[in-house]
Image (cartoon, rainbow, N blue to C red):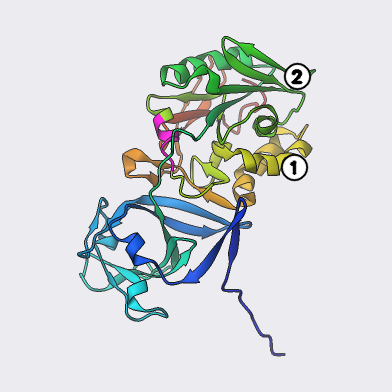
Amino acid sequence: MNVELTIDKERKITVLDSKLVLKPGIDMNRLISTPHLFCRFFDTREGFLLVPIGVLTLEPDGRVTGYSNPNESSWIPYNHGTVHSDKSFAFISGHNNWIPSSTWQQSLGDMPIGFFCDEPESPQKLCLIPNKTISQQTKIIYLIASCLKFYERTVPALLKEMIADGIERERIKIVVNGCQDNFDSIIDGISYAFSTHNAWEWSTLYEAPLRWKFDYAMLIHDTNHIYPGFREKVESFNTHLHWDHLPATPLARCLLGLYSHNYLQRLNPWLKELDGIDKKNGVIAEVSAELLLRSSTALAMGDPESNGGARPAEWKESVDIFNTGIPRLRRVFPAINLHKFIHSETTNSTSL
């Protein structure tokens, strides 16, 4: 039996009301001398995820500045592809000074697309995003996910840390799930949403677009501690595209990260259905990166202290952070100066 395989080369990804189209060639005049965020590119179920490596600039004389890795030591026009050399280029490895480490011949919208071709042998898709930073007009709020049983115990210390880090009270929003009634309250200048929806952190993402207006909402847990520089790191993300989701780690651990209002509205019917989900299934949906895979456009949050590169979460020691006699595992999210304290397998995950 003969089977003909047809691949649609004009992949289109919807970003709000516009579409990104993959096309041959790169506008080198726009690329050269302009800082770009260098990323790994991963196709996902509904779109793509970009994982930042660092900020760099291609200089007219072939140098690469603002970035230090031998894979991208310099660049040259690329002569052996499917487009003319004035619309393509290659990064050159510093190990030999003439063999490419990646070749670039396509654009997704105005983002150059390349493919790694060096060691270790593993084809990797790459991209460059114009390094556009957040504007003062972008409205960001901070969501604290809590519950009726524990919020009076856990939230006050976190609020002190957030206010000390320069986050204004009017930008802090607290969702208290598992309540008898739905109502809003202002306590010490901070908005609380008391909700009958009962689905752990999922309830906060469900309630946020229904209760407040914002461009992006940063989700954190009441079992988090933040450290100086948290706000500055959160608000340093690239805004070249309208992102559905900016997870705090490449695999969106613990649901921590920024979510657009538009994306949470699209998710709202599904999030409503999660009301009453047990802890086990709530965690399964989280660790499966379901919110990441449902998004069309995702960019892992980068660390300004690492030249904008993404950083994974790190497991640390056990500590009885809430003085309950129940130790929790400390998990550090270095890209945003945040620590989360997580139940181990031997403790009751529904207790404090």
Residue 333 shows in this picture = no
Q: Is residue 151 left or right of residue 164?
A: right
Whether tag 2 and tag 1 are in contact, CB under 8 A, the answer is no
Give the image location of residue 198, x and y in percent. Answer: 74, 28
Give the image location of residue 146, x and y in percent. Answer: 63, 23
Which residue lies at the image location 68% right of the left edge and 86% below the top edge? 3
Is 235 part of what is drawn in magenta? yes
Q: CA distance from mark 2 to mark 1?
A: 20 Å
Give the image location of residue 76, x and y in percent. Answer: 26, 70
Give the image location of residue 313, x and y in percent. Answer: 46, 40
Which residues make up the magenta segment? 232-237
The total number of labels drawn is 2
Residue 98 shows in this picture = yes
Neighbour tally class for label 1: few under 14, some 14-19, many 20 plus, Cα within 10 Å: few
Q: Is residue 214 left or right of residue 126?
A: right
Which residue lies at the image location 21% right of the left edge and 70% below the top edge? 96
Q: Outermost residue toward the top?
A: 188
Instruction: Name the one closer to the observer, 297 or 219.
Output: 297
Instruction: Name the one closer to the observer, 290 or 26.
Output: 26
Q: Which mark is residue 179?
A: 2
Q: Residue 259's image quarter?
A: top right
User: Image height check: is 83 above or below 181?
Assistant: below
Q: Quadrant of the N terminus?
A: bottom right
Say which amino acid is labelled 1. Trp
Q: Which mark is residue 270?
A: 1
Q: Residue 20's image quarter?
A: bottom right
User: Image height check: is 253 above or below 84?
Assistant: above
